[in-house]
Image (tube, rainbow, N blue to C red):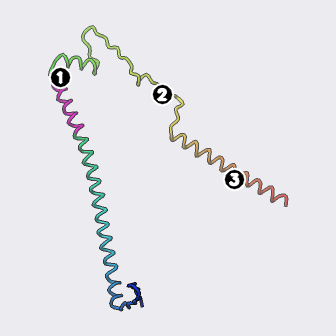
């Protein structure tokens, strides 16, 4: 039997819990915990969903502003391409077209001038070298230990 103590001033009263009350508690308690768990789960999933939707909304707004700017640039480009002089200059600059008697001399950009180092080491190569070095050190330690055991075994 379970007793609950109630402190009420000077008197100490003990109340006996009946079997029916115990049965009610054993039936109602899991149901209440399941309900609370379901509510908590629903609350958390809804909050995560709202967070993801807000993040997606922000990225879409950013994309919208970028697309509006690109649209504006394309409209100005369309207006410029209506001019025959601009089209001729654009073709010369981007597609290396020339007029009669002109020569094209292409200057290299700073990026094109930069030559890759022949001995450039990538991250994968560094990891591979570290693994090989670690393996060699491990083998050295193991074989050195085996030699010491053989020497100790031979002296006995």
Residue 82 in the image: x percent, y percent? Answer: 14, 22
Q: Position of residue 80 (x, y in %)?
A: 17, 22
Q: Are marks 1 and 3 in contact (CB under 8 Å)?
A: no
In this rendering, would 74 be left or right of 29?
A: left
Separation of disc 1 and disc 3 at Cα?
Answer: 75 Å
The stretch in magenta equals: 65-81
Q: Mark on residue 142?
A: 3
Residue 93 sits above or below residue 25 on the image: above
For marks 2 and 3, give the CA distance.
41 Å
Per the image, label 2 sits on a secondary structure element best described as loop
Residue at 37% across, 90% down: 17
Q: Earlier in the sequence, mark 1 or mark 3?
A: 1
Q: Which residue is mark 1?
A: 80
Rendered view: 107 above or below 61:
above
Position in image of residue 26 (x %, y %):
35, 84
Of all residues shown, which one is farthest toward the top? 101
Crowd around label 1: few <14 · some 14–19 · many ≥20 (10 Å): few
């Amino acid at each position: 039997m379970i007793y609950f103590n109630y402190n009420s001033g000077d008197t100490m009263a003990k109340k006996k819990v009946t079997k029916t009350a115990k049965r009610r508690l054993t039936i109602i308690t899991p149901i209440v915990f399941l309900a609370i768990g379901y509510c908590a789960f629903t609350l958390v999933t809804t909050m995560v969903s709202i967070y993801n939707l807000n993040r997606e909304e922000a990225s879409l707004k950013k994309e919208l502003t970028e697309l509006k700017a690109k649209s504006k640039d394309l409209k100005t480009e369309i207006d410029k391409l209506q001019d025959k002089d601009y089209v001729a200059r654009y073709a010369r600059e981007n597609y290396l077209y020339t007029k009669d008697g002109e020569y094209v001399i292409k200057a290299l950009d700073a990026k094109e001038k930069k030559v890759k180092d022949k001995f450039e080491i990538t991250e994968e190569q560094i990891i591979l070298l570290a693994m090989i070095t670690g393996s060699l050190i491990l083998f050295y330690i193991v074989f050195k230990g085996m030699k010491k055991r053989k020497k100790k075994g031979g002296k006995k």
